[in-house]
Image (cartoon, grey):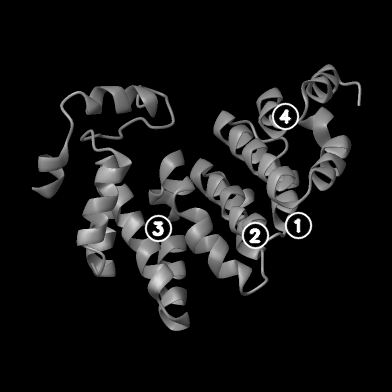
């Protein structure tokens, strides 16, 4: 009921196009109510203490915003939880990662749960496993989760996972890897990003490279794009 009250009349059609729900597209089958992210956040705040049993029900919904609210609640619970509860939420997230099945869902949750949990434990094994997955969304989770490390001044995990995804075939991975590389340059060190790029930019899909060098001076961008570095 609360989802229906918040919907925007023209929203569903726009969002269905924006998230590519057509036959054969990555979001095929996704259903939208037309809620904005701020509206979804307000709903998540009202149900901040929802049980994992009920969160699981929302995650299994075909309705995009219900899955989004479930993940926003999980992020909130993880942030407020102690070590034992965080481990339980982390494992729950991994067990249901294939339901985190659109780019916004991964981007709003992966670094805040998976990245934050692994940052304190030092193991990247699960990210490497996800990076090698046949599931598009697990691969997206793998690279976006490293954003938490970047925010804490560590670029190593991002560069490690990015290298494993250099030859990925999907545009959504190209964009995510390029985005994270750009963040390495912005938040950690541009010199470190450039060292990685100089070794690997010729192997990268064009979209990945364009995203990665977005903040570089125009003359330097042109050199990379022309292959003259």
Q: Is residue 151 above or below residue 172?
A: below
Q: Which residue is mark 1?
A: 156
Foreground of the two, 2 or 215 = 215
Q: Which residue is mark 4?
A: 209
**CA neighbours of label 1 inside 10 A, class few (<14), some (14 to 19), many (20+):** some
Find the distance from the CA under tag 2 to the CA under tag 4: 21 Å
Local secondary structure at mark 2: helix
In the rendered view, does 19 fall on the left or right side of 7? right
Sequence-earlier tag: 3 or 4: 3
Q: Is residue 183 above or below residue 73?
A: above
Tell which tag, 3 or 4, sits nearer the viewer. 4
Find the distance from the CA under tag 2 to the CA under tag 3: 23 Å
Find the distance from the CA under tag 4 to the CA under tag 1: 19 Å
Tell which tag, 1 or 3, sits nearer the viewer. 1
Local secondary structure at mark 4: helix
Sequence-earlier tag: 4 or 1: 1
**CA neighbours of label 2 inside 10 A, class few (<14), some (14 to 19), many (20+):** many
- Disc 1, disc 2: CB below 8 Å? yes
Q: Which residue is mark 2?
A: 149
- Disc 2, disc 4: CB below 8 Å? no
Percent x, y for residue 35?
24, 38
- Which quarter of the figure is the C terminus placed in? top right
């Amino acid at each position: 009921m609360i989802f229906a009250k918040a919907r925007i009349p023209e929203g569903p059609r726009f969002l269905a196009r924006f998230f590519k729900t057509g036959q054969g597209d990555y979001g095929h089958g996704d259903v939208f109510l037309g809620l904005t992210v701020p509206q979804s956040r307000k709903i998540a705040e009202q149900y901040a203490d929802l049980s994992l049993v009920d969160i699981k029900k929302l995650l299994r919904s075909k309705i995009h915003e219900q899955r989004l609210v479930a993940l926003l609640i999980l992020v909130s619970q993880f942030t407020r939880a102690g070590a034992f509860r965080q481990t339980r939420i982390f494992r729950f997230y991994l067990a249901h990662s294939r339901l985190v099945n659109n780019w916004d869902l991964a981007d709003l949750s992966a670094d805040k749960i998976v990245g934050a949990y692994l940052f304190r434990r030092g193991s990247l094994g699960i990210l490497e496993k996800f990076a090698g997955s046949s599931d598009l969304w697990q691969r997206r989770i793998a690279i976006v989760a490293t954003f938490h490390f970047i925010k804490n001044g560590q670029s190593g995990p991002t560069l490690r996972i990015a290298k494993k995804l250099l030859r990925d075939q999907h545009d959504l991975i190209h964009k995510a890897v390029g985005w994270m590389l750009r963040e390495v340059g912005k938040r950690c060190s541009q010199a470190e990003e450039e060292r990685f790029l100089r070794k690997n930019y010729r192997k990268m899909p064009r979209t990945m490279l364009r995203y990665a060098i977005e903040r570089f001076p125009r003359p330097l961008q042109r050199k990379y794009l022309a292959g003259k570095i």
